[in-house]
């Protein structure tokens, strides 16, 4: 099969900030505009190159997801994996590219391309850009492994992986022998964004749509064997997330909310929560993202206080 590859021009500050970090499981390759990115399918290869005159591909990752997000949400989800030391530094870079005032406090909406298994090549293994790369490209160019240039890119990345231990990438190396999709391994940030968008940026319990008040709740926590998978998440208002994690609320396998009697017994309160008892949660549009039945059973049996 053939797969697509994107080579995107990187912000040098973004690259330099991330290249020295050895424990990254995901990064946000953001663009200052909110234009949709549709050049890749999840599992295809996203590479980045430096600005001219350093015309080399210097790293990449497995493409997982993209959407337009407020920069505050991008920072909350990915932190320094946005390629900046702080939200203010990130906002300043966005302002520079948008040509607004450096101290502009706007919560800019930016284009986010989420990459898993990111890797950053040592300089000795930097890959020269393809011969058909145009100096006029300011964003990205797509390739296909069905074409000579795209296949050479694929093989060059495989060669770099074989000569250097690339964090997050080398364990996928065998799969890169023949062009094929790689299943993205989501991190906490990607999980947050995918669950948020899966529920149309509204609390599945209450319909609340104020983004800073919403959390992507794991049904089965990662620390207890749960995965960063969309089907292991439900978007909730933060107070409900806390109650869910502490066993005062759950969702049964019929996707209906159950509220523990312990709220009333322990806090002599909870009327607003009891109004939700028996209500069916909002469902994701994609049935593949519905809450996993076994994760719900685990929460019902091991966390819910009844």
Image (spheres, rainbow, N blue to C red):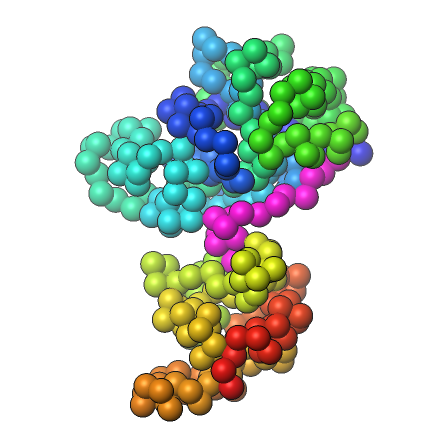
Q: Position of residue 195 (x, y in %)?
A: 52, 58
Q: Position of residue 260 (x, y in %)?
A: 46, 85
- Is 190 situated left or right of 148 in this image? left
- Nearer-the-camera pick, 268 or 12: 268
Question: In this rendering, does residue 34 appear at all?
Answer: no
Q: Position of residue 16 (x, y in %)?
A: 41, 23
**Is residue 219 magenta-colored?**
no
**Is residue 182 magenta-colored?**
yes
Q: Residue at x 43, y 38 (%)?
A: 81
Q: Is residue 306 above or below residue 29?
A: below
- Nearer-the-camera pick, 125 or 236: 125
Q: Residue at x 50, y 31 (%)?
A: 22
Count the marks: 0
Q: Is residue 260 above or below residue 35?
A: below
Q: Quadrant location of residue 60?
A: top right
- Is 14 situated left or right of 60 in this image? left
Q: Is residue 295 above or below residue 151?
A: below
Question: In this rendering, does residue 301 appear at all?
Answer: yes
- Nearer-the-camera pick, 3 or 278: 278
Q: Position of residue 189 (x, y in %)?
A: 48, 48
Q: Residue at x 56, y 29 (%)?
A: 119
Quadrant into which the N terminus falls: top right
Q: Residue at x 47, y 77 (%)?
A: 247
- Is 142 situated left or right of 90 in this image? right
Q: Is residue 298 above or below residue 109?
A: below
The residue segment tinted magenta is 179-195
Q: Quadrant location of residue 141?
A: top right
């Amino acid at each position: 099969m053939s797969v697509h590859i994107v080579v995107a021009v990187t912000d040098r500050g973004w690259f330099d900030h991330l290249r020295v970090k050895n424990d990254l499981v995901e990064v946000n390759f953001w663009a200052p505009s909110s234009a949709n990115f549709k050049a890749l399918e999840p599992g295809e290869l996203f590479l980045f190159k430096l600005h001219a005159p350093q015309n080399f591909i210097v790293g990449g990752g497995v493409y997982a997801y993209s959407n337009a997000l407020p920069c505050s949400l991008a920072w909350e989800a990915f932190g320094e994996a946005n390629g900046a030391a702080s939200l203010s530094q990130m906002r300043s870079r966005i302002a520079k590219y948008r040509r607004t005032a450096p101290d502009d406090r706007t919560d800019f909406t930016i284009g986010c391309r989420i990459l898993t298994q990111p890797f950053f090549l040592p300089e000795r293994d930097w890959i020269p850009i393809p011969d058909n790369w145009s100096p006029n490209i300011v964003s990205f160019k797509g390739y296909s492994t069905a074409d000579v240039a795209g296949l050479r890119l694929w093989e060059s990345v495989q060669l770099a992986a074989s000569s250097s231990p690339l964090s997050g990438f080398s364990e996928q190396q065998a799969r890169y022998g023949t062009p094929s999709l790689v299943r993205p391994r989501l991190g906490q940030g990607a999980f947050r964004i995918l669950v948020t968008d899966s529920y149309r940026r509204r609390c599945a319990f209450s319909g609340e749509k104020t983004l800073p008040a919403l959390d992507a709740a794991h049904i089965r926590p990662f620390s207890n064997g749960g995965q960063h998978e969309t089907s292991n998440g439900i978007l909730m208002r933060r107070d409900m997330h806390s109650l869910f994690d502490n066993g005062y609320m759950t969702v049964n396998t019929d996707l209906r909310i159950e509220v523990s009697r312990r709220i009333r017994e322990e806090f002599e309160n909870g009327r607003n929560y009891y109004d939700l008892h028996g209500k069916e949660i909002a469902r994701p549009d994609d049935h593949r993202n519905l809450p996993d039945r076994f994760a719900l059973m685990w929460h019902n049996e091991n966390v819910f206080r009844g």
